[in-house]
Amino acid sequence: MVMRKMVEIPANHRLTLEIPPEIPAGRGILTFTPAPDDDPFADLGAYLRANTPATIEEAKKEAAAKLADPNRKPFSRHFGALKGAFGDGMEYQRKLRDEWD
C-alpha cells in the first residue's frame, strides 16, 4: 500500500506523522520529494470551485450530458476486476474474523 500526502514543511523542519491503520506494521520507506511550483494540488480549493457545479440543476445537466456521451465507458467494466486478488473469499473472511479473537 502506498500513502501519498502533500505536506507543508515548517521553518523548524519538524513533522509529526500519523500513519493510517490500513498500512501494515513493519518496515517501510519514507521518501521526501520537493513539490514543483506548478503542483496541481497547490490550490485545490480554487480548482474545486472552478470545476464543481454550483447548483443541483447544473450537476444534473452535467450528469445527463456525460450519460449521453457515446464514448462513455460504463463503470460496470470494473466489476470483477479484483476477482482472486485476495484468494478464496471465504478463506479471507475467516482470516479477518480470526484476528478478532
Image (cartoon, rainbow, N blue to C red):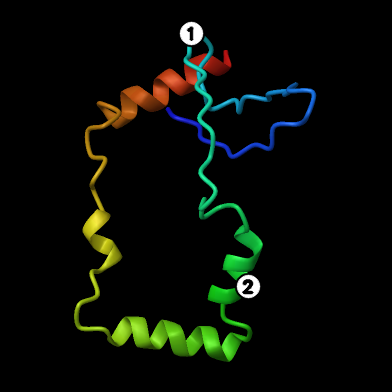
* Residue, disc 2: 49
Q: CA distance from mark 1 to mark 2?
A: 39 Å
Q: Quadrant of residue 92?
A: top left
Instruction: Give x and y (percent) for residue 64.
Output: 39, 87
Question: Which residue lies at the image location 62% right of the left edge and 24% below the top edge?
Answer: 19
15 w.r.t. 41: above or below: above
Residue sitting at x 26%, y 54%: 78
- Judging by the rendered image, the residue that carries numbered circle 1 is 27
Whether 12 is drawn above or below 61: the answer is above
Q: Secondary structure at mark 2?
A: helix
Q: Position of residue 11 (x, y in %)?
A: 78, 29
N-terminal-most mark, 1 or 2: 1
Instruction: Identify the residue at the far front of this view.
Output: 37
* Quadrant occupied by the N terminus: top left
Residue type at mark 1 is: Arg
Q: Nearer the viewer, residue 50 or 56?
A: 50
Disc 1 residue crowd, few under 14, some 14–19, many 20+, Cα 10 Å: few
Whether pointer 1 and pointer 2 mark residues with C-beta atoms closer than 8 Å, the reply is no
Residue 5 on image: x %, y % = 57, 37
Q: Position of residue 82 (x, y in %)?
A: 26, 40
Tell me if residue 90 comes above or below residue 41 in the rendering: above
- Rendered position, 30 above or below 78: above
| Left-right relation of 12 to 85 | right
Which-is-in-front pick, marks 1 and 2? 2
